[in-house]
Amino acid sequence: MNSLASTFATDPFHARFGCALPRTMRDEITWQHMSWANFTDRFSPATGPLRLGSWTGTKTSGGKIEFDATFGIGDTIIACAATTYGPIEALTSMLHDAGFRIEILSFHQQIIGDETATFVLAENDGRREWSMAIEADATLSAVRAVIAGANILHR
């Protein structure tokens, strides 16, 4: 079996959806026959220090969008706003202001049926981690993948 076929055989995303993970993610992760439940626990944690409450965007003049969000951090709910050209720029600015400093190094999205899978490689203080989210809305998928990355990096 060639190495690509071997990788697909142990890739839980490929086993579930029939399409590959981003090559760089696939190359960097040791799968060891990880189950889908273990995969989602690892790359899309349901718990962590940061929780998304709400996310909205309203177009403004000049092509910018005004984004508003609420986040739960521990027992505290915070409201954030940012006016930018895109949701990830707004989100990373909001997270920075809330003390969750991350840099997005790699960003991949792919359509899987009626949903969008987003994969993010993020870094904080030299530590790099992959995260993932799957949602019907591509923007929400991206937002949730970045939040998953922030939670993984700030455990």
Image: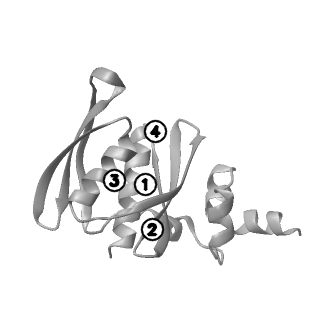
Q: Can see residue 44?
A: yes
Q: Position of residue 150 (x, y in %)?
A: 36, 64
| Quarter holding residue 1 | bottom right
Please tell me whether mark 4 sits on a helix, a strand or a loop.
helix
Residue at x 64%, y 56% (from the top left corner):
22
Residue at x 31%, y 45% (from the top left corner):
90
Query: Is the Cβ of the residue at disc 4 closer than 8 Å to that at disc 2?
Result: no
Q: Nearer the viewer, residue 127 or 133?
A: 127
Q: Which residue is mark 1?
A: 145
| Separation of residues labelled 4 and 1 (CA atoms) | 11 Å
Q: Which residue is mark 2?
A: 123
Is 80 left or right of 83, judged from the image as shown?
left
Q: Amino acid at mark 4?
A: Ala
Q: Can see residue 136?
A: no
Q: Which residue is mark 3?
A: 92
Q: Amino acid at mark 2?
A: Glu
Q: Is residue 122 above or below residue 28?
A: above
| Separation of residues labelled 3 and 1 (CA atoms) | 12 Å
Residue at x 16%, y 68% (from the top left corner):
74
Packing grade of label 1 (10 A; few <14, some 14-19, many >=20) is many
Packing grade of label 4 (10 A; few <14, some 14-19, many >=20) is some
